[in-house]
Image (cartoon, rainbow, N blue to C red):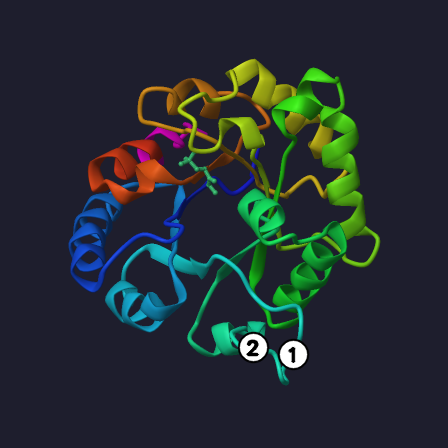
Amino acid sequence: MGRTRLVAGNWKMHGSRKANRGLLEEVTKAVAQVRGVECAVCVPYPYLGEVAEQLKGTTVAWGAQNVSEHAQGAYTGEVSAVMLAEFGCRYVIVGHSERRQLYGESDAQAAAKFAAVKAAGMAPILCLGETLQERDAGKTEEVVARQLDRVLEKNSFETAVLAYEPVWAIGTGRNATPEQAQAVHAFLRKRVPEKTAILYGGSVKPQNAPAIFAMPDVDGGLIGGASLAAKDFVDIVKAAYVKA
Ligand code: 13P
């Protein structure tokens, strides 16, 4: 199959210097023995430098959760892609539904952020997904296609990662069934290069990960809550391994 398998933790606004250190100590140790699955953690800005240091020489990569679409300038509180790249950042989450819903980020903004991340030589993890209302109205494909097309209008997808995260499954404990995830992933697969990793996100836990990751078009996961507990996260990383 040849596509990269990837499990990325999205810590969201959680952590402390002490907690991060302990968590990453356990994760790096356990993940060092895992083959065939890339592992990354996307951490809050203040911890990026320290986390980068701790992860040096390990098999765990790191990323950010957001970025400015601008290169530089009078944008108080913002962080540019070039700044992240300077520290060796590998991944940047773009267009997470929490950014879209709580901070009013538009499809166009997600597209501009995506472009900024790629221009700085990093890999965007583009998130898209429908709300429960949109799913119930039969609009899932229409919504994810719109979100993706806006990015594809101005960007090539090479080196980027896609994450399907149904909004109704995020932080709710209610995950998409493997079949629901597979159906959307297969739909998205036709619109991006064959090599693009498409991750599933939304209440992934060690218990449900094996069935979801067994779907042919699911290449790994973007993990929120469960990425904060070392054992859970490592078990999820292991579940993404498939024998060649
Ligand atoms: P949960 O795994 O906590 O549902 O969060 C998913 C998510 O939003 C990852 O980006």
Q: Residue at x 32, y 42 (%)?
A: 227
- Give coordinates of residue 40: x percent, y percent: 39, 51
Location of mark 1 (residue): 71
Which amino acid type is marked by label 2? Val
Q: Residue at x 29, y 65 (%)?
A: 51
Q: Residue at x 18, y 59 (%)?
A: 21
Apparent side of residue 47 relative to residue 177 in the rendered image (left or right): left
* Up-down relation of residue 186 to residue 66 (above or below): above
| Circles 2 and 1: CB atoms closer than 8 Å | yes
Of the four image quadrants, the one with ligand 1 is top left
Magenta stretch: dominant SS? loop
- Give coordinates of residue 225: x percent, y percent: 34, 38
Q: Which residues are magenta?
A: 237-244
Query: Which numbered disc covers residue 82?
Result: 2
Using the rendered image of the protein, determine whether residue 93 is visible from the camera's viewpoint: yes
Quarter of the image with the N terminus is top right
Apparent side of residue 114 relative to residue 59 in the rendered image (left or right): right
Asked if residue 200 lies in the magenta stretch, the reply is no
**The residue at label 1 has a CB less than 8 Å from ligand 1:** no
